[in-house]
Amino acid sequence: MHGLEPAKAAQIKAAIELGYRLLKENPELKDSISSPADAADLIRYKMQALQQEELWVILLDTRNRMLHIEEVYKGSLNSSQMRIGELFRAAIQRNAASIILAHNHPSGDPTPSSEDAALTHAVVEVGKIMDISVLDHLVIGRGTYVSMKEHGLGFA
């Protein structure tokens, strides 16, 4: 940015990263996740800056408190291929009661694609079988996000 020296920019980035790590590693610092905005706040600063599409899974306990954030897949510039079963591995290992999916669109436009809706629907159905609730799927763009559940995409 104009007027911001590289050293100061590095300090700001380091402070943001430190706050992110503290929140990620200390879920007791955060009350339960009660809205898509709460979930987006956990991840959007880091995800919106990614150069490739990535899919993360936020693992939650029975009170919707974050247990862990698992970075599951890294795709290409605009797509990510994955096996649905892999999304639940960490949830099973950490005994999560529910999950929230999140992936970024490197273009900055968080508008969900038809593939995003199809993936969400499949994950929700597998979650029902595995008794792990899929609470939402967030698409992260630059400075904003879309909750697929709020838009009725992939959730029946």
Image (cartoon, rainbow, N blue to C red):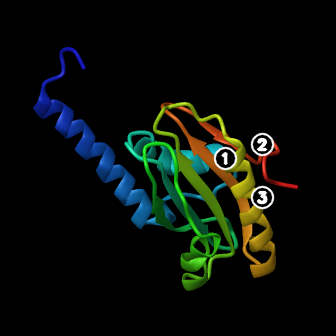
Foreground: disc 3 or disc 1: 3
Q: Quadrant of the C terminus?
A: bottom right
Lower sequence index among marks 3 and 1: 1
| Position of residue 93 measured from the top left corner of the image (x, y, whole percent) | 55, 84
Q: Which residue is mark 1?
A: 36
* Image: 24 above or below 52: below
Q: Which residue is mark 2?
A: 150
Q: CA distance from mark 3 to mark 2?
A: 14 Å
Q: Is residue 47 left or right of residue 116?
A: left
Closer to the camera in the image, 107 or 60: 107
Q: Is residue 32 left or right of residue 150?
A: left
Quadrant of the rendered structure where residue 1 is? top left
Q: Judge whether residue 44 can be spotted in this image.
A: yes
Q: Amino acid at mark 3?
A: His
* Image: 143 above or below 102: above
Closer to the camera in the image, 140 or 11: 140
> On residue 121, which mark appears?
3
Lower sequence index among marks 1 and 2: 1
Q: Is residue 24 left or right of residue 81?
A: left
Q: Residue at x 74, y 72 (%)?
A: 127
* Count of all numbered marks drawn on residues in the image: 3
Q: Residue at x 43, y 66 (%)?
A: 26
User: Is disc 1 in contact with disc 2, using a CB cutoff of under 8 Å?
Assistant: yes
